[in-house]
Amino acid sequence: MRVILFTGKGGVGKTSVAAATALRSAELGYRTIILSTDVAHSLSDSFDVLLGNEPRLIIPNLWGQETELSRTLETRWGSIQRYLSALLA
């Protein structure tokens, strides 16, 4: 598994670059999920597909999700913490 994070100031193209990277990965046959925690939820606009808090298939091998970070952290912090501990161990 590979995790790629796109970070930076607002308006620099993080969503566009992340969407292009995810699309290319899926086209190459990699099972890919693109996840946005941005409150603006512009990922749906990038793919012209309504995305929500659960992964949705966009094209073969590509799923998208826009989540409310604060809500997700509240409900899933324990599993997130275990995953990150295993990932970074």
Image: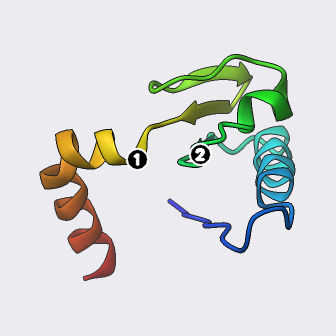
Determine whether 14 is above or below 31 in the image: below
Residue 33, position as x, y percentages in the image: 60, 41
Query: Residue 46, located in which quarter of the rendered image?
Result: top right
Residue 15 position within the rendered picture, expressed as x and y whole percent measured from the top left = 77, 52
In the image, 2: left or right of 73?
Answer: right
> Residue at coordinates 47% horizontally, 37% vertically from top-left?
67
Q: CA distance from mark 2 to mark 1?
A: 9 Å
Identify which residue is drawn at 68% across, 17% down: 50
Mark found first going from the N terminus, 2 or 1: 2
| Mark 2 surroundings: few (<14), some (14-19) or many (≥20) residues within 10 A | many
SS class, disc 1: helix
| Residue type pointed to by label 1 | Leu
Residue 35 on image: x %, y %? 57, 44
| Residue placed furthest toward the left | 78
Residue at left 66%, top 71%?
Answer: 7
Q: Quadrant of the C terminus?
A: bottom left
Question: Which residue is under mark 1?
Answer: 69
State left or right for residue 27 relative to residue 49: right
Residue under pointer 2: 36
Q: How many marks?
A: 2
In the shown orientation, is residue 4 left or right of residue 26? left
Tell me the SS state at disc 2.
strand
Quarter-of-image position of residue 32? top right
